[in-house]
Structure formats: structure tokens, C-alpha cells
Amino acid sequence: MSKVNLSEVGFSFLDEGLYERLTVAEHLKLYCRLYNSSESIPLVLRKVHLEEKRNMRVKQLSYSEQKRILFGKLLIQNPELYIFEEPDQNVDFETQRIFMLIIEQLRNEGKSLLILTSNMESAITIADRVFKLDENGLQEIQVASESEKEESRDQQSDKIAQEEIQPVRFEKIPTKVNDKIVLFDPPEIAYIESNDGQTYLHIKGEEFPTTFTLNELENRLQHFGFFRCHRSYIVNLQKVREVITWTRNSYSLVLDDEEKSSIPLSKSKMGELKAMLGLK
């Protein structure tokens, strides 16, 4: 068995310390010296979207921004094998997006990646091959490529047409993240928004694009307690905490989430909502 050269392996741990008194730029310079790297600091800052925070000390940064410094560390080290432990756990959507861009860059450079995560959805979204460790050992999870999924859907459609079977009602809502399709259960969705012709699902403070129109989603989700509160919004009534009246013609719904999201409620829908809630 050949020996592994640890200098060719880069680690990003879930709990990895940073020097709180150092600035972002000072951290990256330290990593350049540590790994004897000539990597451009401005380029790394741009890749992790910390250009404007370069002179801020670590203790002034958010958890997600601190995580990006660690991504930058690995870009400076430039190993052949990258190992990430829970890279997108508890980080904001922007940091998740940056991580995905870094992963795509490393793939294009022919680097090897190992991602350890407890989030199956995250694993399926990011990785080409997914394994699950349980009491039976390490089991590979089959993840179809986009072309395979399209072919499978075509074959299923042909089979249904030939056998004249009624199609099975599929309740989950698909969204596309890079080249992967992610499926969400309706109760997970807080609200749905249409903006510039694109429809987005809002889930736990993040937004995911979907190919469905608002009208299609309204018909599909109505029996789950979703309500078309505005021409551009559908809301999950189970997530609504307050109905606020600003003026006689201006209303909004406040959701029971961390962001306390505020969704517009049109005047024409106020009466319909009252009726649904049993109010006069």
C-alpha cells in the first residue's frame, strides 16, 4: 500500500480555530507563509467574497464569513485532496453559494474532494457519488445525473401511456440547484414568491428556484393549506404568526420564522383570508 503524503491533503474541519485579533487579509497572508504559497491574496479574497472585509478582524465577522476564511485557506494550500467536514452547516445562503462555486472550480481543476456531512440533501446536491454510513456499514446512495433523470421520466411516461394507468400524484416540489434536482415537502415551504418571471421557494431563510408558475403551485398546494395572498406571493398559512393592518388598504402577514418574514396581503384577499380563519 502506497503512503499518503499529508502535504497533498487539505482539511476544513467543522470546528476550526481562527485568530480573533487578526484581520481577514492577515489570516490569508499567514496561510501563504505556512504553506509556502504565492497565491494572490486579492484573488482569494474575491473568490470567497471578502474583499470589503479584508481589514476587519475575525471577531467582527459573522460565523458564515469566518467559514469563508477557512475556504480561502484551502485555496491557498492548493492540495490534491480536499476534505470538508460539514462545510455548509449553519451558514447563510451566500456562503453556500460561494462554496458551490469553489467546488465547481476544484472539479474543473481535476482535484479530488471528500465531503463529510450529516445532511443528505446537501450531499446529493453537491456530490457526484454519495455514501451513507449506518449500522450496516458504508452504503452507496444512487444519484442519477440530469440526463438519466430525463431519460427515466420519459420511460415512465411512455410506460404509463402504454398501460393506460392514471399517473401517481407526486406531492413534493422539485427545484434545481446546479445540475441536481432537490425535492421539498410542501410543509417545509414558508412562502413562494414570483420575481421577474422566476418563481422561488423560501425555506428556512433560503430561496430555491422552481420551474412551476405561481398558478401551477397554487393549484398543487392548495390542499396543503397554502393561500394566494398576493398576485406575486403564496404563503403557507401554517407558518403565519400575525396579520398586520397598516392602513385600511394595506396589510401584511408575518411568518413564524427566524427572519420574521413579512409577506404582503392584498386588500382583495383580506376578506377571503378572514373567511378561511372563521373571522368576521
Image (tube, helix red, strand yellow):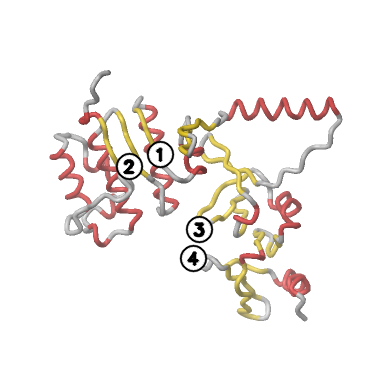
Q: Which residue is mark 2?
A: 47
Q: Earlier in the sequence, mark 2 or mark 3?
A: 2
Q: Residue at x 22, y 30 (%)?
A: 6
Local SS, label 4: loop
Left or right of 274? Residue 252 is: left
> Is 147 on the left-hand or right-hand side of 47?
right
Residue at the (53%, 32%) spot, across then down? 141
Q: Are marks 4 and 3 in contact (CB under 8 Å)?
A: yes
Task: Write the residue at 72% across / 43% down.
Answer: 170
Identify residue type, mark 1. Answer: Leu
If you read the primary sequence from the N terminus, does the residue marked by circle 4 or circle 3 appear first? 3
CB under 8 Å between discs 1 and 2? yes
- Mark 2: which secondary structure? helix
Identify whether 179 is placed above or below 92: above
Q: Amino acid at mark 3?
A: Gly
Q: Position of residue 156 (x, y in %)?
A: 73, 28
Q: Residues within 10 Å of mark 2 (few under 14, many from 20)?
A: some
- State the separation of the CA atoms marked 3 and 1: 20 Å
- In front here: 171 or 267? 171
Distance between the Cα atoms at labels 2 and 3?
23 Å
The residue beneath circle 3 is 205
